[in-house]
Image: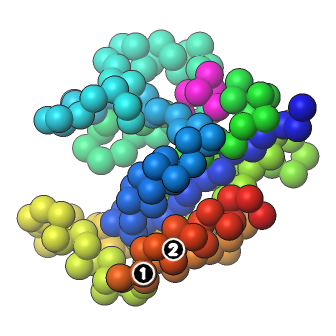
Amino acid sequence: MQQGKLVLLIGPSGVGKSVILKALKMNHPEYVFPRSATTRARREGEGEDLYHFVSEVEFSQWCREDKFLEWAQVHKGARYGTLLNEIIPAIKQGKTVIREVDVQGFQNIRRSPYFGSDKNYTLNTIFILPESEEQLISHITKRAPIEKEELQRRIDSVRMELAVRSETDTQIRNVEGKLADTIRQVEEAIVA
């Protein structure tokens, strides 16, 4: 049996990764979409389809037990992690695993003992670019009211994240009004 691979969708917040991931889930039931573990509070209407909601104590225990491929502490202290048991078994079965991560997650996975050119498993990385910085800022500010300092912090973060794009296998620009084209390009990059 041919071994599968891990495909990472990477890009700054607000660029459309979640919308692309949702379309991939609908179009490709043959792919595996692992859940993240998180210590953040469950939002209204959220089920268990995207996250394992765990306590800080449980998350720390899983860290000590090396259950994570990668984990990070993000916005306001919540921790998020990619569980090995949601990834490696599926790859061993020959499946394609699709995972949305931030730049920090991408760098941690790339440095992990599991993925990379000289490692055991195949990694395919796709960076989703905004149409422009202005368009991305507009998306961020439309989501919810945001303080000026927080907006500047996010803009600085976006610029740092965009600098990583050259380290990925494929870069795809998500142009406003052309989501279907973006999804098609992502699908092509996954099977390439």
Report the colour scheme.
rainbow
| Secondary element type, mark 1 | loop
Give the percent coordinates (x, y) of residue 159. Answer: 44, 75
Q: Quadrant of the N terminus?
A: top right
Residue pointed to by mark 1 = 178
Identified at 57% across, 48% down, the residue is 28
| Secondary element type, mark 2 | helix
69 sits left or right of 81 in the view: right
Identified at 17% across, 35% down, the residue is 45
Count of number-bearing discs: 2
Q: Quadrant of the C terminus?
A: bottom right
Q: Which residues are magenta?
A: 82-87
Cα separation, mark 1 vs mark 2, equals: 7 Å
Above or below residue 21? Residue 141 is below
2 sits left or right of 92 in the view: right
Give the percent coordinates (x, y) of residue 73. Answer: 40, 40
Give the percent coordinates (x, y) of residue 49. Answer: 37, 31
Work out whether residue 85 can be spotted. yes
Residue pointed to by mark 2 = 182
Looking at the picture, tell me which residue is in the foreground, 192 or 149.
192
Looking at the picture, tell me which residue is in the foreground, 54 or 100.
100
